[in-house]
Image (cartoon, rainbow, N blue to C red):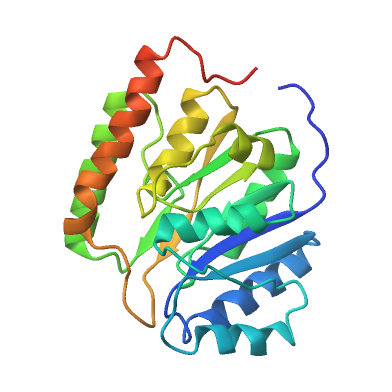
Amino acid sequence: MSASSTLTLYSIVIPARDEQDSLPHTLTDIFETFSRGEVPHEIVVVDDGSRDRTWEVLQELKLRIPTLAPVQNPGPHGFGRAVLYGLNHMRGDACAIMMADASDSPADAVRYWRLLNEGWECVFGSRFIKGGEVIDYPRVKLFVNRLANFLVRIGFNIPLNDTTNAFKAYRRTVIDGCRPLMAPHFNLTVELPLKAIVRGYRWTVIPISWRNRKYGEAKLKIKEMGSRYFFICAYVWLEKYFSRGDYRRN
């Protein structure tokens, strides 16, 4: 792998809608883990139209977490739109997308950072390879997850078996190279990695852990997302097989 420029700032982008109870633990854990690991970072939390005290909680947390940089998405709202808003406002030359509910491990995010600095342009985590772990995953969602990821893996002929998981890391050059990003909802979680792969960026996979949320309600609604996932996968699939490389990195 050819040497790449040294990274200077790691932006953690977290979409948050009605997450007043989850954010204190999530953000404190990220800050403390990154500080121990001496990772230069900012935590960009996007309040995506919350109706609870999410914004007030973020202002309180900002007093004791100096790297916290909360922003408010004025709308329209949606998971993908909130992530994109955060990506547009981040200052880092690399980023990771994490969830507000503490389901993602900050220690895994530090491992992502180390690998990006080794020259990888994308680092993808998988909960379903040796060393990976899932804790309290709802059975129905687990079945749907494994089926969807199997179809993506076969359709794109890639070894990645956890494409739908949002928790991934990218150099800024990859984010910019995957624009325009179209998915307004959770289907952004497949648009970003699939575009990065199809467009020729260097990527690797490591095992990660995931645990179910303790507070609040999951925002992903399976019935609402099926056709949206299909649309984005079909869109990127067409690019892979029919664009004749027009969108591949230089």
The answer to whether 155 appears left or right of 103 in the picture is left
Q: Residue 68, image x and y in percent?
A: 70, 73
Residue 7 versus residue 130: which sits nearer the camera? 7
Depicted 140 relative to depicted 61: above or below: above
Quadrant of the rendering where the N terminus is positioned: top right
Measuring 42% from the left and 63% from the top, which residue is drawn there? 76
Measuring 32% from the left and 68% from the top, which residue is drawn there? 219
Residue 13 versus residue 2: which sits nearer the camera? 13
Q: Residue 58, image x and y in percent?
A: 61, 83
Write down the quadrant of residue 210 in the picture. Answer: bottom left
Write down the quadrant of residue 218 in the picture. Answer: bottom left
Quadrant of the rendering where the C terminus is positioned: top right
Measuring 28% from the left and 30% from the top, which residue is drawn there? 234
Residue 3 versus residue 36: which sits nearer the camera? 3
Depicted 166 relative to depicted 58: above or below: above
The answer to whether 58 appears left or right of 103 in the picture is right
Q: How many marks?
A: 0
Measuring 74% from the left and 55% from the top, which residue is drawn there? 91
The furthest residue to the top: 244
Q: Residue 127, image x and y in percent?
A: 41, 51
Write down the quadrant of residue 221 in the picture. Answer: bottom left
Q: Residue 137, image x and y in percent?
A: 29, 64
